[in-house]
Image (spheres, helix red, strand yellow):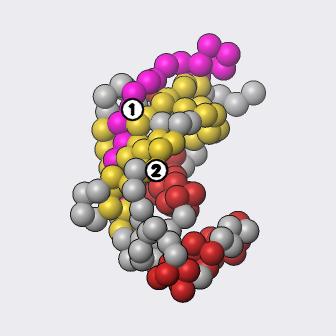
Amino acid sequence: MQEIETLGLGIPWEDLPVGRRFKTIGRTIFESDVMNFVTNTGMVEVLFTNLEFLKTQSAIKGRVVPGAQVFTFAEGLLVQAMMQGTGLAFLQMELSVQGPTFVGDTIHVECEVIECRESAKRPGLGLVRSRNQVVKQDGTVVLVYTPLRLVKGKKYKPE
C-alpha cells in the first residue's frame, strides 16, 4: 500500500535559513476570547473585566486585549503554520508590546528567521530564532518577540 503524505506538519530546522520570511493566516479576537483568557489565567484585572473603568479611568479607551493573550494567539497561529511535530521546546525570548490590541482586531504574525544552527548538544536538532511581529488588520505592529526554539531536523531519530 502506498504511503499517504500528511499535510500540516512543521518545518524542519534545515528549511529555516536566516532571512526566510513568511506570515500566518489571520485570527480575529472576540469578546468571548478575552473573557475566557482572563478567567482561565486569573488575569481578572479591572482593565479587562470592568467596562466602566475603561470608560472613566483607563488611559486606553476601548475593549483592550491582554498583551499576554496577543502573544498566546500569535504562538497558536505559528503552531498551525510551521511547528506541528517539529517544534520541541521554547527556550527563551525577548518581547516588546508596541501598542494596544482591541476586541474585534484581526491579527497575523510576520516571521523572519534571524538565527539557525544545528544544536551542539543534540545532533539532528536545531536552534532557530525568529523575529515575530504581530500585525493588526490596519498594518499596525502591536507586539514584537524573538523566540529561540529547539526544532527537529530532517534526519532526527529519537533515542
Write the residue at 56% across / 36% down.
Answer: 93
Q: Which residues are magenta?
A: 108-124
Q: Please tell me whether mark 2 sits on a helix, a strand or a loop.
A: strand
Number of residues whose C-alpha sits closer than 10 Å to that of mark 2, classed few (under 14), some (14–19) or many (20 or more): some
Which of the two labelled residues, at mark 2 and mark 1, occupies the earlier sequence position?
2
| Placement of the C terminus among the 4 image quadrants | top right
Write the residue at 62% across / 13% down.
Answer: 120
Residue 123 shown in magenta: yes
Write the residue at 48% across / 36% down.
Answer: 146
Q: Which residue is mark 1?
A: 113
Q: Which residue is mark 2?
A: 97
Dot 2 and dot 1 residues touching (CB under 8 Å):
no
Work out whether 100 lies above or below 127: below
Which label belongs to residue 80?
Answer: none
Residue 142 is situated, as x and y percent measured from the top left of the image, at 38, 55
Residues at marks 2 and 1, CA–CA distance in whole angstroms: 20 Å
